[in-house]
Image (cartoon, rainbow, N blue to C red):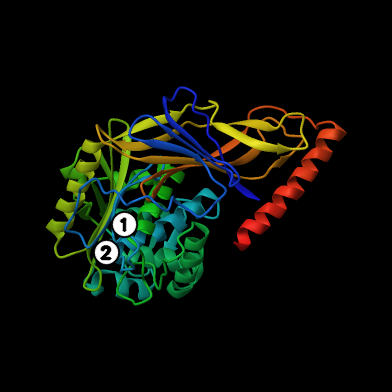
Amino acid sequence: MALFSNLSARGVPLTKLSRLVGVGLLAVLVGWAGMALAANKSVQGAPAAAAKDDGGYDTDAPTAILIEASSGSVLFEKNADELRAPSSMMKLMTAEYVFRALQRGEIQLTDEFKVSENAWRKGGAPAGGSTMFAEIHSRVSVDNLLHGAIIQSGNDSCMVLAEALAGSESAFAEKLTQRARELGLTRSTFANSTGLPDPGNKMTVRELAKLARHLILTYPENYKIFGEREFTWNKIRQQNRNPLLTMLEGADGLKTGFTKEGGYGMVGSAVQNGMRLIVVVNGLEGADDRANETKKILEWGFRNFESRTLFKAEDLVGYAKVFGGEKRSVKLTSTEPVRVMVQKNGNDKLIARILYRGPIPAPVQPGQPVGVVRVWRGANLAVEVPLHAAEEIGQGSMTWRAFDSVSELVIGLVRAGVSKL
């Protein structure tokens, strides 16, 4: 059975304690900006009473999202789940597939792939779009192809990589969609490697932000390419198409995009004072609009948010019930701090809950994974951190185990009765 358990309030000023006996609900309201620590038998997502809080900010972008990178916490969103053509921002998915192949040792940066006539005609100089100007039938290293795809948004670069890794661009697109599902991008679909117009290319700004975060955290060395200001190939020097690199302090990625179907969009990221933010906009009417909106959203985020630590690493976070143990509950901690983004001098309302499947059968070992702690800011899930047992709980006596068995039987019957009401 999945349970929400009570959180430890150690070091947090209590302002109210309420119990709802019989339903098994324990709610503790604690200080600073009305954070609620709750134990609830319901597991249906965010609290029903939570209201969306955008901090009073708005953007001209039809779709937009701003997240904090380390936690994935959503700071602002607007139509974030609306499917649109991702245009060249889709090249982030192609980059991820290649980065993963490199990480797994399936290819090397020094490997050279041949530029086919198809890649040259459809993505190279004859096509008239963004290109790295790779020559037909030449051989180009994976390293240079990645630079061409990321810095110059080269369609030819992506097509060469796709053909080399999957045999054809259509087969590569199928692999991209499959890989997207593995990453939890459940709505993204791909029909090519470039983002060139096709009804099969669809993404949301939420999933683009999730993809960008994955790239930054999983491939830190490869990610550095996104921050390079220029790249020269075939004696043609091209500037990085990302205007944020010269507009905003700490900007180091990621990718712009434009098609008539999708409008002007951008995925951008920057670091200031040790905090990394990721922004995605799409559907704007001009290149200046996307640059200015992206910059403004990031500046608003850096100006208005800060990280707060709710629990330090290995702090007592809460308890989980134990079945058949020498103790009735086990202490829960996390190997990492539980941090959440809050508005500076604001009145964020946070709700934190521990979710686990239990009661946990004894014996329980220290370090044993038990569940997660989830923190919501309004209707948005701000952070989720795994929890483990902080102590050893041995098996209880035969008497206690028999008592627990009877208790679980009775409680199970009560639950079944309540569910029918």
Relative horizontal placement of residue 106, taking residue 244 as reference (left or right) = right
Q: Position of residue 384 (x, y in %)?
A: 48, 43
Q: Residue at x 52, y 29 (%)?
A: 8
Q: Could one spot residue 114 in this view of the protein?
A: no
Relative horizontal placement of residue 57, taking residue 371 as reference (left or right) = left
Where's the C terminus, which quadrant?
bottom right
Pick the front one: 225 or 391? 391
Which type of secondary structure does the marked residue at label 2 adopt?
loop
Which type of secondary structure does the marked residue at label 1 adopt?
helix
Give yes or no for contact between labels 2 and 1 (Cβ–Cβ under 8 Å).
Answer: yes
Q: Which residue is mark 2?
A: 131
Q: How many marks?
A: 2
Q: Is residue 17 above or below residue 282?
A: above
Residue 61 placement: quadrant: bottom left
Give the amino acid at mark 2.
Thr
Relative horizontal placement of residue 8, taking residue 375 as reference (left or right) = right
Q: Residue at x 36, y 65 (%)?
A: 203
Q: Residue 148: which numbered mark, if any?
A: 1
Give the amino acid at mark 1.
Gly
Q: Position of residue 1 (x, y in %)?
A: 66, 51
Tell me how far mark 2 sits from mark 1, CA to CA. Answer: 7 Å
Pick the front one: 135 or 42? 42
Pick the front one: 117 or 68? 68
